[in-house]
Image (tube, grey):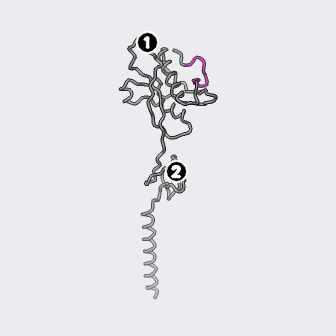
């Protein structure tokens, strides 16, 4: 009789191990899953919690698809550089797709700081703004956009034409919005003696 009990217990243990093994192999363990708009830890994922939003924008694979919107940035236009009355502050609007945000003016400036695409460069459009420029603060109030950049904005720039082009690119990008009538540019809080030729 003891032998029969041992056989039955052995079969039960084997079945239990089999059922648990199938459950763990077929379930998405060791990952983060989006459930009810929140990231839920399943198992022991080696990756940290995802930084992107979790919610209605998920596709069937659980990957978040972020909504985007179209804004304009303004680049310098070199196509008329040979003309006698070339305007250094002449810009041309080009479209950019940016993640949807309430901070649309800042998103537009961030897109401007990315520079021109190769296709735009081939068409004669370019950015005079140095790489590595960062927006430190942007406030829009009473029709005035006050934007503060780091010192990289004026690093090794020279000539009144380049300064006019940089100012125009920033100003035109911000003035596309009806809430902006004028733009004040500063570097580390300074407005005087910046972007001098």
Q: Where is residue 56 in the image (x, y as percent from the top left)?
A: 51, 51
Q: What element carries label 2?
A: loop
In the rendered image, residue 161, in percent from the top left (x then y), is placed at 47, 16
90 vs 11: above or below: above
Looking at the rendered structure, the secondary structure element under dot 1 is loop
Residue at far bottom of view = 1
Query: Could you say where residue 7 lies in the image, as x and y percent from the top left?
Result: 43, 82
The stretch in magenta equals 182-194
**Which mark lies nearer to you, 1 or 2?**
1
Residue at mark 1: 85
Looking at the image, residue 194 lies above or below residue 59: above
Residue 186 visible, this orientation: no
Whether the magenta-drawn stretch holds residue 84 is answered as no
Residue 54, which numbered label?
A: 2
Quarter of the figure with residue 86:
top left
Q: Residue at the location (56% across, 19% down)?
A: 194
- Say the numbered circle drawn on residue 52: none
Closer to the camera in the image, 155 or 35: 35
Q: Using a 10 Å C-alpha cutoff, classify the residue at mark 1 as few (fewer than 14 neighbours), some (14 to 19) or many (20 or more).
A: few
């Amino acid at each position: 009789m003891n032998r029969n009990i041992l056989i039955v217990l052995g079969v039960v243990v084997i079945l239990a191990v089999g059922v648990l093994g199938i459950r763990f192999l077929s379930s998405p363990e060791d990952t983060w899953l989006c459930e009810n708009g929140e990231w839920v830890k399943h198992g022991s994922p080696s990756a940290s919690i995802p930084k992107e939003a979790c919610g209605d924008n998920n596709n069937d694979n659980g990957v978040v698809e972020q909504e985007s919107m179209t804004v304009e940035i303004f680049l310098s236009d070199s196509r008329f550089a040979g003309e006698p009355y070339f305007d250094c502050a002449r810009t041309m609007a080009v479209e950019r797709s940016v993640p949807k945000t309430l901070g649309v003016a800042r998103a537009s400036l961030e897109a401007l700081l990315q520079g021109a695409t190769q296709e735009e460069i081939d068409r004669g459009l370019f950015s005079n703004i140095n790489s590595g420029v960062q927006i430190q603060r942007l406030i829009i109030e009473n029709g005035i956009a006050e934007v503060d950049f780091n010192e990289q904005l004026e690093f090794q720039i020279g000539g009144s034409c380049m300064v006019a082009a940089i100012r125009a690119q920033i100003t035109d990008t911000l003035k596309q919005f009806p809430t902006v009538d004028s733009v004040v540019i500063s570097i580390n809080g300074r407005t005087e003696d910046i972007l001098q030729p």
